[in-house]
Image: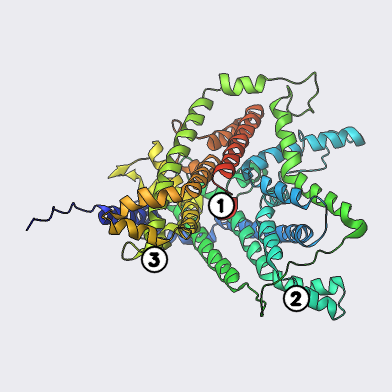
Amino acid sequence: MTAKAPRLFDVSRPVLIAVAALLAILIALPMGWLIVTSFSTKDGQATLGNFVTLFTDPSFLDPLLATLLLSVSVSVICCAVAAPMGWLVARTDMPLSRTVRTLVMASLVTPPFVGAVAWEMLAAPNSGLLNQLWRLITGAPDDEALFDIYTFEGLIFAIACYTFPYVFILVANALDRMPGELEDASSMLGARTWATARRITVPLALPTLLAGALVAFLQTLNQFGSPAILAIPAGFHTLTTKIWSLFQFPPKPELASAAALPLLVLTVALLRAQSLVLGRRGYAVLGGKYGAPRLIRLGPWRWPAVGLALFVLSLPLFLPYAALLNTAFSKVSSQLITPQTFTLHNVVFTFGELSSTLPALQNTFVLATATATVGGLLALLIAYIVARRAVVGHRVLAFLATAPLAIPGIVLGVGLFLAYTRPPLTLYGTLWILLIAFVTIELPAAYQQLGSAFHSVHPELEEAGRMLGATRLRTLKDITAPLLRSAAIATWCFVFVGVIRELSAAVILFTSETKVLSVLIFDLKESGDVGAIAVLSLTMVILTTVVIVIANRIGGSVRLTSRVAG
C-alpha cells in the first residue's frame, strides 16, 4: 500500500480573505477618521461645535444652500433638454439620429472642469471670444458683454452642458426598450400621436426621467472642478469648493470633515432613491415578445429637429473645442486665430519650458497604469469571490466594493488626508496616497464591469479544474481569466481614463512633487497661463479618446456612465 503524496497548502482562501480585509481597510479607515475628526476639536476633544458652525455660520451655510439650488437647477435643465432629445433620437424618424447619439457619447469624454475652462475662454465678460465677436458685429462698447460666465447662472449652464448626456442616455435607452404594442393599441383606438405620447409614452418613461434627474443632481452636488474655476472668481462658494478652501493655510481639517459628512449622507440617500426608482421601473407584455416601437414621422420638422440637436451639442462639443484650439495655437488667446496669428509657441512652452509639465505627465501615467493594474486585479478577485461565493460574507464584500460610489471624491480626499498624515502609515506627500485614492474611486466601476462578465463564464469550467486538483487561484488564472480577456482589457482602459480625468480627490492630496495632469491644469488656471491650459486640456482629451477607442476595439464597449462621478 503506497502512501499518498502530501497535499500542498492551498493559499487560495488566505489570499481571498486578505483581499476582503484590504477592501474593508480601504473604505473603513478614511471614513472612520472623517467621522472621528468631524466630532473633534483641534485638540482632539469631542464636540458638536463643528456642526453648529456649519449650520449657523453664513460662510458655511451659504455654500450649502448655493449647492442645493445649483443641483436642483441643473437637474431641471438637464431633464428639459435631454428628454426631448432622447425622444427625437429614439422615437422619431429624425435624420442623423445615430450621429447625434455618437456625439452625445463623445461629449462625455470631456472632463467637466476642462469644459468650464473652455467656456471661460468663450464667455468671460471682457476677453471671451463670443463677447468680442458680438462687440465686433454690433459695435457695442468694450465694457458691455452679451455673456458672463462668472455668475451663478453661468455656472449652472456650464455644469448642465456636461451633465445632460447622462440623462439623455437613460431616457433614450428606456424609450428604445419600450414595447410598441401599447402605443399601437392607443392609435387603433383613435388616439392621435400627441395624445398617445402624453398618455402612454410619457408615463412609461417618467420613472427613468426621475432617475436621470437624481443622477444630474448627484453629479452637480459632488462636482468640484467647474465651481472652482467659475464660482470662486465670481465671489461665491459651493460646498465642495468650501471644503477645499478649508485646506488652505491655515488648514481646518475638523471643519472640512464636518462639511464633508452632509455631502456623504446626501449622496448615500440619493443613490438609494435612484436605486428604488430604477428598481420599480418596468413594463411587461403578456403573451409573447413585444415589437419595436413605431417611429413617429416628423414631416417638415425633420431637419429643424436635426438643427436643434446639433445646436445643443455645440454647447458641450463644437464651441468649447473651437475655443481650446484657438487659444492653443493663437498668439493672442482672446483673438480669433488667423494665418498671421497662428503659432506653436504655446505647445513649445508647455512641453519644453514649463518645468512642471513632464513630471505631471509622468505622475499621471504612473498612477493611471498602476491604478488600472492594481484596481483591475483587485476588482477581478472581488468579482470572483462574489460570483462564486468563495468566502463567507461575500455579500458584504460586494457592498464594500460598490460603497465608494456613495463617497464623493472631495470627501474621500479629506478622509485619506486625515488617515495617512499620521502614524503608522504617513503617506501624504507620496504617490502612494494618490494611488489609494484612485483605486478606491475607480473600484466600483471596475467591479461592476467584471462582475457582469463573470455571468458569461459557467462555473462548471472551474469545477472541472478543481476536480483535477487545481486550486481556486489556479483555476482563476488558467481558466476564468483568459475567458474574461476582453472585459478585463476594457476595464483596465476604463480605469486608466478615470484616473486621467480625476481632480476632486487629487486636489486635496497632491504636493508640489506629486502633481498630476488635472491638478496642473487647475494650478495654471490660478496663474493665468491660458495657452498652456488649452494645450494641456487638449492633450488630456486626446489621451482619453485614444484609450477609449482602443478599449472599444479590443475589449468591447467602455461604459462611461457606469460611475456617477464628479
Q: Residue at x 93, y 57 (%)?
A: 300
Tag of residue 395: 3
Tag of residue 229: none
* Pointer 3 local density, CA inside 10 Å: few below 14, some 14–19, many at least 20: some
Looking at the image, tell me whether mark 2 or mark 1 is earlier in sequence order: 2
**Left or right of 151, for residue 429:** left
- Distance CA(mark 3)–CA(mark 2): 39 Å
- The residue to which callout 1 is attached is 565
- The reply to whether dot 2 and dot 1 touch (C-beta < 8 Å) is no
- Distance CA(mark 2)–CA(mark 1): 36 Å
Q: What element carries label 2?
A: helix
Above or below for 198 versus 49: below
Q: Which amino acid does label 3 sit on?
A: Arg
**The quarter of the displayed image where residue 337 is located:** top right
Residue 321 percent location from the top left of the image: 72, 37
**The quarter of the displayed image where residue 394 is located:** bottom left
Residue 22 percent location from the top left of the image: 33, 52
